[in-house]
Amino acid sequence: MAHKIVLKSALLAAAACALFGAASASAAPIDVAKSSVITTSKQMSVAVDGKFKKFSGDVTFDPANPSAGSAKVTIDIGSYDIGSDEYNNTLKSAEWFDSAKFPQATFVSTSIASAGPGKLTVKGKLTIKGKTQDVSVPLSYQVAGATQTFDGVTSIKRLAYGIGANEWKDTSVVADEVDIKFHLVVTK
């Protein structure tokens, strides 16, 4: 009988360790060298692409249990580049990103749900210039060994974040809708 109790205790301990290990899965850092965050906006109906050169973040994701996952991305607003030093400096101003006062933008997931094989819907809070909005991001993912790759595009309204003040509020000059396209690579 004592042998059965010891065996049951050992099995319970092993199960608890397995559950604890799964629940406390560590986040994997984004490999910035292999990743990108790109925006597309329209100025006078012409597409303008820009990219953030500096960002960081962590992703916790198990394809067998997507809802247990999480993601956090922090973007250095001052690293935004549209290919012109003059325009880059203008975009750092208070009328646009106000990167001196608000040096970072963040995305923090609140839920991750499967949307079919290789597809997810990630909901979360996007904060830019101190303003937070709920966003829903459809994305695709691939797993190759220890490497996970996430690709998606979502649209935001720049004016909801206070991006573009004074004469730049005119959406006939610079459209309100901005697409954010990302390619994130993590290795566990």
Image (tube, rainbow, N blue to C red):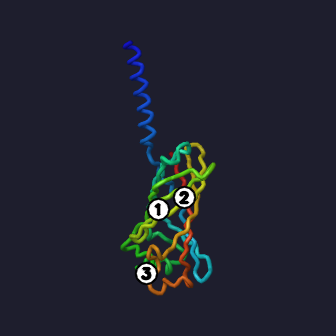
Tell which residue pokes out farthest to the bottom in this image: 167
Q: Which residue bears the numbered disc 3?
A: 95
Residue 11: x and y, percent?
43, 24
- The amino acid type of the residue labelled 1 equals Phe
Give 27 or 126, whichever is nearer the viewer: 126
**Of pointers 2 and 3, the one earlier in the residue sequence:** 2
Neighbour tally class for label 1: few under 14, some 14-19, many 20 plus, Cα within 10 Å? many
Residue at the (42%, 19%) spot, across then down: 7
Residue at the (41%, 72%) spot, across then down: 129
Label 2 vs label 3, nearer the camera: 3
Picture disc at residue 35: 2
* Image quarter in which the N terminus is found: top left
Residue 34: x and y, percent?
55, 56
Q: Is residue 115 above or below residue 6?
A: below
Secondary structure of the residue carrying numbered label 1: strand
Q: Are marks 2 and 1 in contact (CB under 8 Å)?
A: yes
Q: Are marks 1 and 3 in contact (CB under 8 Å)?
A: no
**Of pointers 1 and 3, the one earlier in the residue sequence:** 1
Tell which residue pokes out farthest to the front in this image: 1
Q: Which residue bears the numbered disc 1?
A: 55
Number of numbered callouts drawn: 3
Label 1 vs label 3, nearer the camera: 3
Secondary structure of the residue carrying numbered label 3: loop
- The amino acid type of the residue labelled 3 equals Glu
